[in-house]
Image (cartoon, rainbow, N blue to C red):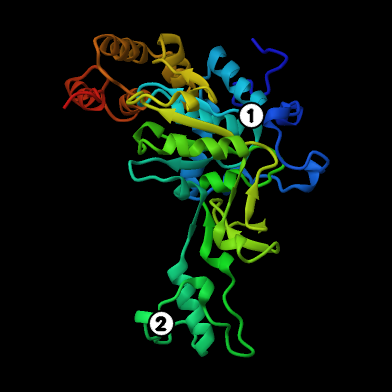
Amino acid sequence: MTEGWWIYRGTGVPHGGIAGLPPAPAWRAFGDPDGDPELLPAPPLEDSAAGSTARRLGRVRQASAYQADEREVRLVNLALHLRRPLLITGKPGVGKSTLAYAVAHELRLGPVLRWSISSRSTLRDGLYSYDAIGRLHEAGLSRHGHHRGSPEPRPHGDDLREDFLIAPPEHGRTAPAIGRFLRLGPLGTALLPWRTPRVLLIDEIDKSDIDLPNDLLNVFEEGEFEIPELLRLGPGPQEVGTADHGRTAVVRGGVVRCAQFPLVVLTSNGERDFPSALLRRCVRLEIKPPDEHRLAAMVAAHLGEETATAGATTELIEDFLRRQRAGAELANDQLLNSLLMAARVLRTGGPEYDAVREVLLRPLNEG
């Protein structure tokens, strides 16, 4: 079923439907209301993401094969229309992060900007990083006429200064541009003024420090952030690195301000509760373990229709679901791995395959 207001349809087939996304509600509008969106940069092509060609193609195949159900499609569209983050909860391996890739692939929104969270992650990590020591070193080389590779005495005591206190270079020499040492993180890159929304995946937000969810709120509300290292240089443009592999962007006046609020997908394994201030700003989606029909469709998409309809596949899916109902935590890719080994190498039903299947389908919650 396809509703008329759906932008993302869950088909896995790329299309230009994002052009039909209605204007943002007044309380979620960003950027210049009188500006021409066509003058803004388009996201990079999906296959320009960092990583090996094989891995990129595998991710695209995974995204196109994702089997979104009607409820998931509906909630993704709510997040798109309302310009609100999508908070996805569910057991490990049910496809929470893959949904972000599926949306980006189908709507041609460029490579997914992924920020994997740990207990040490801070808001600054997602926004940008600045190599002040590297710039201090390069400025010293420029000031004294050294080239890369030349020995340079390390500063000490009163000679160690902040980058903005570095003395001007000698006549005829140029100080290194600050942008060479500043790189926007996944969140910072998503908040650049793109022609269409980028997809930002904040993966496993429940592993974060207790303060990070609250720290994100202001950025989500304002759609912008300041970079102090650039602010003090004045209103001029500065070219900086981005989280898109090998690409740069121009930041003016030290402020990164979005034109289209990104589709922010936060995933959680349900290991903690979140503050109500964050929850009320999110569209919340719980992905439950797939049933037999959805698993069969997933197998067909990844391994082909012939594998999906084989008797051994049906038997293994039933075993997979039976184990889940008994309390075992099993991920979808464990099922795919088992079927792949059955089809390629091992003798289905033989003792060798039974032994390997026990390894591949070992519950995640088993010590």
Residue visible at 47% across and 39% down in the picture: 215
Looking at the image, can residue 17 be seen?
no
Q: Residue at x 57, y 13 (%)?
A: 70
Q: Is residue 193 left or right of residue 350?
A: right
In the picture of the structure, the residue carrying the numbered disc 1 is: 83
Above or below, 342 against 186 in this view is: above
217 lies left or right of 345: right
Answer yes or no: is residue 127 visible: yes
Q: Relative to the observer, which residue lies in front, 182 or 217?
A: 217
Q: Secondary structure at mark 1?
A: loop
Number of residues whose C-alpha sits closer than 10 Å to that of mark 1, classed few (under 14), some (14–19) or many (20 or more): many
Residue 363 percent location from the top left of the image = 24, 22
Q: Quadrant of residue 251?
A: bottom right
**Which of the marked residues, 1 or 2, is nearer the chain's N terminus?**
1
In the picture shown, does residue 41 fall above or below 95? below
Q: Position of residue 18 (x, y in %)?
A: 71, 30
Amino acid type at circle 2 is Asp
In percent of width and height, residue 262 lies at 61, 36
Task: State the quadrant of the C terminus.
Answer: top left
The circle drawn on residue 159 is 2
Q: Quick one: which residue is furthest to the front in this view?
A: 158
Distance in Å between CA atoms under marks 1 and 2: 49 Å
Mark 2, other Cα within 10 Å: few <14 / some 14–19 / many ≥20? few
**Residue 30, located in which quarter of the rendered image?**
top right
Q: Quadrant of the N terminus?
A: top right
Q: Amino acid at mark 1?
A: Arg
